[in-house]
């Protein structure tokens, strides 16, 4: 046994394939954190485990929701290679990936919204020790997403509308 705690490591892409997820389940049972990547699933469904399904499998294995997170890799590049290792495509993940997988966690996997939403709010904030994030409380820096009929209508971040009435007002550097 070493001196480092499992919670000092934050492995990501744990749903990259079924055997990585199996390892992540064992890691989570020992007290480790498990991060699931949402932005790449639709591009590699032949071997990736759907993030929403991964949450269900992790919870069923006894891993607490407080140690499960969703991330999108900031919707970075999604390269595709042929059998010889040559780059044959390069796509970009979609910012909607986290929302889509959150909704699927609730609707397809039957996880209550108040539990599922933690993978995008309190769990990452607590794990990363971002005490001002993850909760809507007085004095905290809450970013807000307003949803109606399973669609995002408004997004407020750092006190400013980023999206209002489904219209994007501010874009990221690579959009």
Image (cartoon, grey):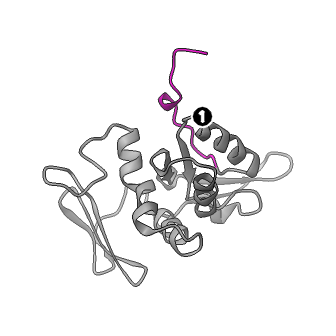
- Picture quarter with the C terminus: bottom left
Membership of 77 in magenta stretch? no
Residue under the image location 55 percent in, 60 percent down: 93
Name the residue tied to disc 1: 30
Left or right of 66 in this view: 49:
right
Magenta: main secondary structure equals loop
Residue 43 horizontal/vertical position (percent): 66, 63
Q: Give the range drawn in magenta.
A: 1-14
Q: In the displayed structure, would residue 138 be above or below residue 160?
A: above
Residue 144 horizontal/vertical position (percent): 27, 64
Q: Residue furthest bottom?
A: 149
Q: Which residue lies furthest to the left in this view?
A: 139
Membership of 7 in magenta stretch? yes
Which of 127/60 is in front? 60
Q: In the displayed structure, would residue 101 be above or below residue 69?
A: below
Residue under the image location 81 percent in, 53 percent down: 82
Residue 87 horizontal/vertical position (percent): 73, 50
Residue under the image location 41 percent in, 46 percent down: 124
Residue under the image location 26 percent in, 41 percent down: 131
Q: How many C-alpha atoms fall within 10 Å of the one at disc 1: few (<14), some, or many (≥20)?
A: few
Q: In which quarter of the image is residue 107?
A: bottom right
Callout 1 secondary element: loop
Residue 156 horizontal/vertical position (percent): 25, 65
Left or right of 14 in this view: 142:
left
- Picture quarter with the N terminus: top right
Left or right of 40 in this view: 75:
left
């Amino acid at each position: 046994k070493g001196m480092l705690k499992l919670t000092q490591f934050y492995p990501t892409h744990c749903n990259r394939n079924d055997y990585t997820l199996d390892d992540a389940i064992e890691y989570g049972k020992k007290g480790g954190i498990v991060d699931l990547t949402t932005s790449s699933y639709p591009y590699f469904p032949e071997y990736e485990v759907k993030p929403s399904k991964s949450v269900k499998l992790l919870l069923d294995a006894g891993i607490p929701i407080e140690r499960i997170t969703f991330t999108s890799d900031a919707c970075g590049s999604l390269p595709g290679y042929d059998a010889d290792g040559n780059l044959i495509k390069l796509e970009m993940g979609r910012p909607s990936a986290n929302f889509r997988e959150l909704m699927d966690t609730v609707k397809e996997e039957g996880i209550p919204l108040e539990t599922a939403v933690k993978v995008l709010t309190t769990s990452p904030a607590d794990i990363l020790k971002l005490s001002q994030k993850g909760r809507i409380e007085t004095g905290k820096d809450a970013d807000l997403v307003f949803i109606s009929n399973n669609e995002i209508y408004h997004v407020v971040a750092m006190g400013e509308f980023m999206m209002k009435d489904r219209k994007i007002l501010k874009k990221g550097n690579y959009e």
